[in-house]
Amino acid sequence: METLEFCDKHNMVAYLVKSEGSDGFHEIIDFFTSSHIYYALTECPTLYISLIKQFWQTAALSTTEDRVHDITATIDGRDKIITKASIRRHLKLQDSEGLTSLPNAEIFKQLTRIGYATTSDSLTFQKGHFAPQWKFFIHTILHCMSSKKTAWDQFSSNIATAIICLATNMIFNFSIFIFDAMVKNLDSTHKFLMYPRFIQILLNKQQRLLLPHTRTYSTPTLTNKLFCNMRRASNGYSRVVIPLFDTMLVQPQGEAPSTSPSRITSSPSLSTHHTTSSTPTTPPSIQITHEAEETATMPHDSPLPGGHAPGSDEGRLKHIELIELVTKLTNRIAAVEKDLQQTKKTYSTALTKLVLKVKKLEKQVRSGKARRRARIVLPEDEDAAEDPSKQGRKIAQIDTDPTISLVQDEGTSWFQENIETQEKNSADTEVLLEETTLTKLIENLGSGECHTP
């Protein structure tokens, strides 16, 4: 079995705390905190080494009858299935029908707006060419959400698409992105323990495992030291500070709430998603698009009604609690349905056995009635002590009577056995008397006496 290793800079936990030294990064921290990928960035379960290794050692791609691909792995003797829908549901991404790619020309155009300057047409981009806040943005996505395990100063076109979608208020389909990366890792020559944090979250949401697991892996976490690193200028950085887009700015806490329930804005250059920007005095709410509203098809993909205002911890906590409650109820319903099916199967088998047994007994009863004849039961009275020869004559009389039929069964077999025993004893007694008489006759002849017995 192949040896698989963890990567300590892959699938890390994001650091989104406004700690000492974070000045200048508060806007991007607020953006991530109010983003739909916040749970996937920050959820930190206990990682059990044996579970993650079992998953990747047994994982294989399969296709259902509906031609839907899924990844099946055997954990402690049980099959666990991961699909795009389960990734979306358990990581709370809400990205159904989101984009997975953009035209190359659009990618270059939007990266130029962010401050990326290059004359090359390569689709491998350099993180160090961006201003500090954008650099922090890209760095967090790379370490927490991408499938990379090396070359952290570079990112590909799919990560560029994700960054552009997040920055311009479009939906990027991280669920498909994560699932496809896992599929590529199945047969990769450089296979490793990809997405351990996400795998553990998915396994925790499925049926409870039976075997104990104690060995844990320390989840890698970004720290506040990255703020200092993001400020360092890299080769290729133009020293021009590009502010975050208006669609990324979150209303600070303490300002008067707006009468508008949400703000729907996007980049002016993306005409397909263009809407009117709100005035500076209008506080924003959840950043959503018409696509997100129209393409939600599943309960776990749809945002909960009411939402929360970005920057409001109270609203966001309620939103997360409701999602967790729905997930728990869904899992409980699935468990109850499975138990009900098993119970029906058990009782159906028992009922079938009982029906067959009843039919067999009924058949025996009908057969017994058809063969039933007159039965004679001799009472135990003074006749039982009579001479055996008299009992024999009675039996002979019964045998010659054509109107009487003797049937031996379990209740009267003892009587016949008793008669046979008595007849044998009588015969033995007669033989013994004859032997005694002969012996006495011989003795009398020897003594000279001869008497007729």
Image: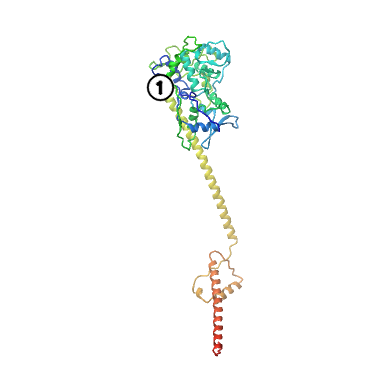
Residue at position x 51%, y 42% from top?
343
Residue at position x 54%, y 46% from top?
349
Which residue carries the number 1 mark? 313
Q: Position of residue 187 (x, y in %)?
A: 58, 28
Q: Quadrant of the N terminus?
A: top right
In this image, 261 relative to 393: left or right? left
Task: Give amino acid for label 1.
Answer: Asp
Instruction: Specify few, some or many for label 1: CA neighbours under 10 Å numbering under 14, 14-19, or 20 or more.
Output: some
Q: Quadrant of the C terminus?
A: bottom right
Above/below status of 430 relative to 343: below
Q: Secondary structure at mark 1?
A: helix
Residue nearest the observer in this picture, 303 or 89: 89
Residue nearest the observer in this picture, 401 or 295: 295
Above/below status of 163 relative to 407: above
Q: Position of residue 247 (x, y in %)?
A: 48, 15
Above/below status of 434 relative to 159: below
In this image, 216 relative to 438: left or right? left
Residue 432: in sight, yes or no? yes
Q: Position of residue 309 (x, y in %)?
A: 43, 20
Residue nearest the observer in this picture, 132 or 161: 132
Q: Position of residue 195 (x, y in %)?
A: 51, 26
Identify the coloring.
rainbow
Query: How many marks overall?
Result: 1
Residue 90: in sight, yes or no? no
